[in-house]
Amino acid sequence: MIRFIARRIFLETIPALLVIATITFFLIRLAPGGPFSTEKSISVEVLNQLNSHYGLDKPLLTQYFLYLSKMLTIDFGPSFKYPGRTVTELIAESFPVSLELGLYALIIALVLGILSGMIAASKPSSIRDYLTMSVSMTGICIPSFVLGPLLVLIFSLKLGLFNVSGWNTASDRILPALSLGMVYVAYISRLTRGSLLETMVQDYIRTARAKGLSEKIIIFRHALRGAILPVLSFLGPAAAGLITGSFVIETIFSIPGLGRFFVTAAFNRDYTMIMGTVVFYALIMIFFNTIVDILIAFLNPRLRSTLK
Amino acid sequence: MKKLGLLILLPVICFIQCGSKSTPVENGIKKGILHYGNQTEPQDLDPHIVTGVPEFHIIQSLLEGLVIPDPVNLQPLPGAASSWEASEDNLNWTFHLQSNGRWSNGDPVKASDFLFSFKRILSPALAAEYAYMLYCIENAEDYHKAKIDDFSKVGVKAPDDSTLIIKLGKPTPYFLSLIMHHSWFPVHPPTILKHGNIDTRGTKWTRAENFVGNGQFTLATWQINRIITVRKNEQYWDAANVSLKEINFYPIDNNLTEERAFRTGQLHITSGLPSQKIDWYKTNKPDELRIDPYLGTYYYLINVTRKPLDNKKLRKALSLAINRDELTEHVTKGGQIPAGCFTPYNTAGYSFDTVLRFDPAEAKRLLAEAGFNDKNPVPTFSLLYNTLESHHTIAQAIQQMWKEHLGIEVTLINQEWKVYLASTNSKDYDIARMGWISDYNDPNSFLDLWVTGSGNNRTGWSNLTYDSLIDAASRASDQSIRYGHFKEAESVLMDELPIIPIYFYTNVYLLHPSVKGWHPNILNIHNYKFISLE
C-alpha cells in the first residue's frame, strides 16, 4: 500500500504535474494580449514598470525556472489581476466554498443516482425502468445553466422560498447543490443500471438466488458491490470537477468559489492565477484518481495485487 | 417511510421559514444598511492602483479627496478641504484642510499626508496607471517618468499642517473636477509604511484589519467574491450628516442574477440591467428603472491606413448610412442618445453641433464621388468587436444598414476581449467597435484622444491642424477661447471621420424607491453622504 502510494507520487504525480505546468506556462504566453492590456492605453513607462515588477521582463526560460522553483514551495506568486493578493491566498479562500458545494452535489448525485439506477435495474424493460431512465436522460440533456435559473424561477421567484443568489445562509446551498448534482445523478443512474444488469446475470448471482436469498439481499450485498466499480471509476474525475467548482453555477448563484477563477483568470491573462488553478486542479484530479484506484482494488479482489 | 416523510418535510419547513422572513432591503431600510450591487470583485482598494468603476464605488466611501462633487450638478463641495482659492492665472491653488479632519484611527489629516500620497502615486516603481491624472502639477510628469528624482521640485507644498499648495504647470480649467478622481485621494502614510515602502505595489494595507481611511465609512469586512461591508466612520469630520450606518457591496457579475436579487429584495441598487428586461420595467415598474445620461461615447474606430477606408468620402458615406435613431430605439433600447458628434452634449457646458445625420441619398452620392460604382464596388472589409451580445446586435444592425443603403458587404468578426485589444493595438483590423467613458467632466478628455501619438488613437489618423488646436486649447486659460479651439478641432475630426460615433451612453440600472438623495449625473458619482433610506 505504501509502495503503491509512493509509486503514485514519485513516478506519476510529480512528472505529470511538471508536464502540465510546463505546457500551461508556455501555452498561456502564446495567447494574444497580455495581463496589462486595457481599453485605455497605458504609458510605456508604466507598462515597463509593471513588467519589471512581475518579472515579465526577464527571458521566458528564466521566468519558467523561477516559477518552477517557487512552485516547489507552494508559492504561486501574486495575482496580476488582484495585486494585493497571492494566488495561494485566493485559492485558499475560495476552495473551501467550492469544496462544500461540491460535496453536497456529490452526495445528491450518489444517493439519487445509485438509488434510481437500482430501481431501474430491479425490473428491466418495465415501466419503472423506462420512466427512471427517461428522467435520467432528461437530466443529462438539461445543462446546469438551464437547470439553475429554472430552479431559481420556481423556488425563489415564484415561491419565494430561497434567496436567488449569495452564499450566506444554510438554505443558500440547496439550489446550487441541486443544479450541480442533478446532471451527475443522471450519469450515475445510467451507469449503475447498466452495470447492475450485467452483474445480475453473473454466475455468483445465480448461485445466490439458488441459495434462496431474497432479491433485496442479492442486490445490496452481492450485485451492488460489483456493479459499483464503473461508478467509482467515473467518480474520480467527476468528484475532482465537482469540488473544484463550476464557473456556470458560481456565476448564476453568485457563489464565491474557485470555479470562476478558472475562466476569469484566462480571460484576464492572469498568468500566475492560471498556473495556480491548473496545477491545483491537476493535483486534486490525481488525488481523487488515486483514492478511486485504491477503493476499486479493495472492492475487487482480482485487482488487489496492484496495491502491493 | 416515516423517515422519508421527515426528509421531505425538513426542506419544506426551511422553505416556509425562509419565505416568511423580511428581505434584506426591508431590514436595511429599518437599520440604515444599503445593499449595493457592485458588478465585480474589486482588483484592490488602493486608490493609487485601481482603475475600475466598481473599485471607485467602494473607495469613495473609505477615502475622501480635497473636494467632493455636488450630487446634483457635480460642482465642487468641501471634502477634506474646507475651502480653497486660486491665483489670478489659475496656476496656484491653495487648499485649507478641515480643522477636525481625522483618519479612522483618530490621527489628524495633515497637508503632508496629501504630499505623501501625491509622491506615492507619482513614484515610478508603483506603476500606477492613473499617475497621468496628476500631470497637470508642475514637474509631476518628469518625476513620474524618472527625469527628475527630487520630489521637492514637484509643484506641491505643505507650509503647515492645514494648508496645501498645488502649483500647476499649465492652466487646467477642469482642475477641480480632476481632483475628485480617486487618483488624487490621500492615503494614511504610517499605514502604508507599516506594510511596505512608499512605492511598494500590492501590500496588505488595504485589508479590512489594516485599512485606515479618512472617508465617511471604514472597511469592516472584505470576503472575496462574496461581500465588502463598510460601516459609518465616527471619526469623519462631518459624521453628523452621514445618514447610512452601513453599506454592503456585492460583486454580482451576472446582470441577470443581479436583477433577480433586486426583484426578491436582496439589493437596493443594481450596477446594470439586461437590455431584454428594460421594456418590462418600463411598463411594470417605471419607478424602479433609472436611465441616466453617462459621460461616454460608443463609436467605431477606422483603420485609415488600410484601403479602401483610407478614403475620406467612403468613411463619410458609411457614417451617413447609419440610422442612429432607429438603432437606439429598436436595438440598444436603453435610452442612449444618437451621437451627432463625438463629445457628448453639454460636457461641462461644451456642446458641438449635431453634424452626423442619417442621409442615405447623400451617402450614395459621396460613394459615387469616391469612385465606387457597380463596376468598381467597395471591397469587402471587416467589422471587429469583442465577444458580447450587445456589440454583436449593434454590428449586425449596422452591417444591414450598409448593405441596404450602400450595397457594401461587411464581414463581422468577434474576438475574445484580450485578443481584440491586441488586434486593435496592433492595427490589425478594418473597423472596430470602441467605447470611451470619461474620468472627468471636460471635453479635453474626449478630444485629446485623437492627437498624433496618443496611445488611444489606434486609427493611424494624424492631422497637424487638429494637433495644434488641441495644443492651443491646453494652453488657453479663458474657457470661451478654449472651447472655441475644441470646436474647431472637433469640426476637423467630424470632417475627416477616422471614427464613426454611434451613440452617447446612458447608465441603465435599478434603484429601490426607498433610496433618497440619489441624483442622476453624467459621471455616475453618488457620494454616500447625501444618501439615505426612508
Image (spheres, grey):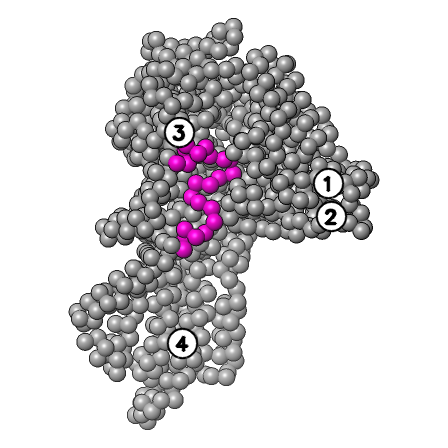
**Quarter occupied by residue B309:** top right
Label 3: chain letter = B
Amino acid type, mark 2: Val
Using the numbered discs, state the Cα–Cα distance from disc 1 to disc 2 in whole angstroms: 9 Å
Q: Residues within 10 Å of mark 3 (few under 14, many from 20)?
A: many
Q: Earlier in the sequence, mark 1 or mark 3?
A: 3
User: Residue at (80%, 39%) from the top-left corner?
Assistant: B369
Query: Is residue B34 shown in magenta?
Result: no
Using the numbered discs, state the Cα–Cα distance from disc 1 to disc 3 in whole angstroms: 44 Å
Amino acid type, mark 4: Thr
Dot 3 falls on a residue whose secondary structure is loop
Q: Is residue B419 visible?
A: yes
- Left or right of residue B297, residue B530 in this image: left
Using the numbered discs, state the Cα–Cα distance from disc 4 to disc 3 in whole angstroms: 57 Å
User: Residue at (41%, 33%) from the top-left corner?
Assistant: A46
Is B109 in front, or is A267? A267
Q: Residues within 10 Å of mark 1 (few under 14, many from 20)?
A: many
Amino acid type, mark 1: Leu
The residue carrying mark 3 is: B48
> Do tags 3 and 2 sit on the same chain?
yes
Q: Which residues are magenta?
A: A27-48
Q: Which mark is residue B378?
A: 2
Label 1: chain letter = B
User: Residue at (36%, 66%) from the top-left corner?
Assistant: A237
- For discs 4 and 1, the disc positioned in front in the rendered view: 1
Tell me, yes or no, whether the two marked residues, 4 and 3, touch with CB atoms within 8 Å.
no
Using the numbered discs, state the Cα–Cα distance from disc 3 to disc 2 in whole angstroms: 48 Å
